[in-house]
Amino acid sequence: MKYESISTRIRRRPFIKVCGQTYTGSVDCAAAYGAEYIGFNFCPGSINFVSPAHAAGMPSAHVKRVGVFAGQEAEEICRIMQQARLHLAQLQGEQTPDAARRIGSQRVIRTLHVQPGCAVSAVQAEVDAWAPFCCGFLVESADAALVSRLQFPHPWILSGRAAGDALHGMLNACRPDGVDIECSVNCAETMARMREMVS
C-alpha cells in the first residue's frame, strides 16, 4: 500500500481520515460516508484510547487503518501495528527518525505541531529532516499563511480541529491532500458536513 497513491495531486479533493475510533458503528459510518482512513488512538491517557485487541476487533473493510502513538518506542509500535492490523503509524510524540526507520518509512505519518509565531524556515527544516523517514505528514496548525508557504515532499493531512469557517479557510488557503477529523457521537452528521466542505 502506497500512501502517495491517494494524493489530491491525482484525486483533486482532500481525502478524509476519521480519528479516535472506539466502536464498530462509528467505523462503519465513516466508511459509508467515504472516509479513506480511520485512526485508533494508542496514547495512554487519551479519552479515545483503545487497546490493540479492541482495535483488532473492529473490522474496517476497505478503509486503511492508522494507529496514533505518542510515547511508545519502535518495537512496541511494531507489535501494536501487527496486533491491531494497522497499515500506518502516526507518530506525534518524541519519537526519533531512527524509530521511524525501524518501523518502516513507508508506514509512518509524522505529526507536526506548528505553534503560533513559528518561523516558516524552522517548520520547513523539520519537514525536510523527516522526509526520508516517513511517507506523509499530519499538520496541526491554525496559521494558514504559514502552512501555505511550506513545501511538502509527501502528501500531507490537515488536522481538522478548527471549526466551521476557520477550517474551511484553512482548506482553501493550504489545499492539503487530506483532512483529519475526530470521531463524533453523531458520525453521520459530522461526515456529511465534512464531505460537503471538501467537495
Image (spheres, rainbow, N blue to C red):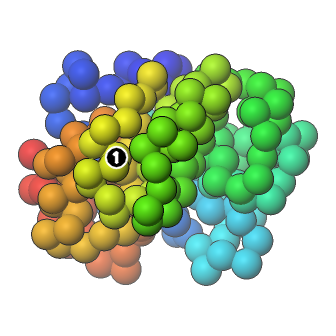
The answer to whether 95 is drawn above or below residue 117 in the figure is above
Is residue 57 at least partly visible in the picture?
Answer: no
Numbered disc 1: secondary structure? helix
Q: Quadrant of residue 184?
A: bottom left
Check disc 1: other Cα within 10 Å, few if <14, some if 14-19, many if 20+. many
The residue that disc 1 covers is 147
Left or right: 197 in relation to 46 = left
Looking at the picture, how far across and down is residue 192, in whole percent?
16, 62
Q: Is residue 78 left or right of residue 120?
A: right
**Residue 134 percent coordinates (x, y):** 61, 28
Q: Quadrant of residue 148?
A: top left
Task: Looking at the picture, tell me which residue is in the foreground, 138 or 149.
Answer: 149
Asked if residue 10 can be seen in this view, the reply is yes
**Residue 53 rendering spot, x and y as whole percentages:** 75, 58
Relative depth, front residue between 105 and 87: 105
Question: Image check: 190 left or right of 150?
Answer: left
Q: Residue at x 83, y 54 (%)?
A: 72
- Residue depicted at x 37% and y 80%: 185
Relative to 145, is 107 above or below? above
Residue 37 picture location, percent across and down: 43, 44
The image quadrant of residue 29 is bottom left
Figure check: 137 above or below 173: above
Label total for image? 1
Dot 1 amino acid type: Val
Quarter of the figure with the C terminus: top left
Closer-to-camera residue (134/146): 146
